[in-house]
Amino acid sequence: MEPAYKILIADDHPLFREAISSVISSGFDGSEIIETDDLESTLEITLEHDDLDLILLDLNMPGMHGLNGLITLRNEAPGIPVVIVSAEEDKQVVLQAITYGAVGFITKSSPRARMTEAIQQILNGNVYLPSDIIRTGMESSHRRSRGDDKPVSPELLNSLTRRQLLVLERMSKGESNKQIAYNLNIAETTVKAHVSAILRKLGVHNRVQAILSASDVDFSQYLKR
């Protein structure tokens, strides 16, 4: 039986709150759902319920002022994971949200099954990034001239073991630790150890930075050795 979660949906559109509530009810049976429609009430509820497992936060509801609302919420309740759920699909907004403390970014255009999978990944302790947005950024012809992304150097990639390269390759495809463990036929604890080693060797602070730094790596070239 799935564990029951306590989840706050913060969005000013009743129809979307109803839709995401339906996703949670069907995908996470027995979960308690709380709804708010502006930042002020979200902050009040968050302070009253410090046992929340997750906050699903809309970027554009009243009081948010874009990512400033996320920063305020993270400062007030740093222990509660926050995932942005937004119609915004600009890669830089996604990356800024993660930088400011969100543990994931789900687009409102996502299919129901993908939303469920994303929420499950986040509840499992992983970061969720929309792979289609990241891919769009990778395919941008002027990406390098902008200098927005910092690709990992060949020297750092060569410092990774073959197994670490395989884990990083699957991380860059958006796979969770559980999926990586299954696909590589290793224990999930082993995957976590590899991820920690990868972050340390690449000199990045979190999984998202590692994924972005390796977004244009041709892993086949490094796995030949």
Image: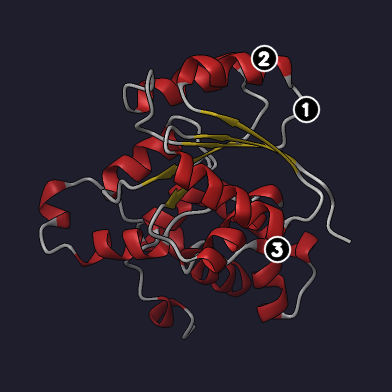
Q: Position of residue 81 (x, y in %)?
A: 62, 35
Q: Secondary structure at mark 2?
A: helix
Q: Secondary structure at mark 3?
A: helix
Which is more N-terminal, label 3 or label 2? 2
Identify which residue, 215 or 134, lies in the foreground.
Answer: 134
State whether residue 189 is above or below residue 64: below
Quick one: label 2, few (<14), some, or many (20+) residues within 10 Å? Answer: some
| Residue annotated with mark 1 | 51
Q: Position of residue 96 (x, y in %)?
A: 35, 36
Which numbered mark, 2 or 3, is in the foreground of this view?
Answer: 2
Identify which residue, 34 or 56, lies in the foreground.
Answer: 34
Three-letter amino acid code of the residue under disc 2: Leu
Q: Residue at x 47, y 49 (%)?
A: 208
| Callouts 2 and 3 close, C-beta under 8 Å | no
Q: Position of residue 39 (x, y in %)?
A: 47, 20
**Left/right of residue 202 with respect to residue 144 in the rendered view:** right
State whether residue 174 is above or below residue 143: below
Quick one: label 1, few (<14), some, or many (20+) residues within 10 Å? Answer: few
Which disc, if any, is residue 191?
Answer: 3
State whether residue 5 is above or below residue 46: below
| Residue annotated with mark 2 | 47
Q: Secondary structure at mark 1?
A: loop
Q: Residue at x 65, y 71 (%)?
A: 180
| Callouts 1 and 3 close, C-beta under 8 Å | no
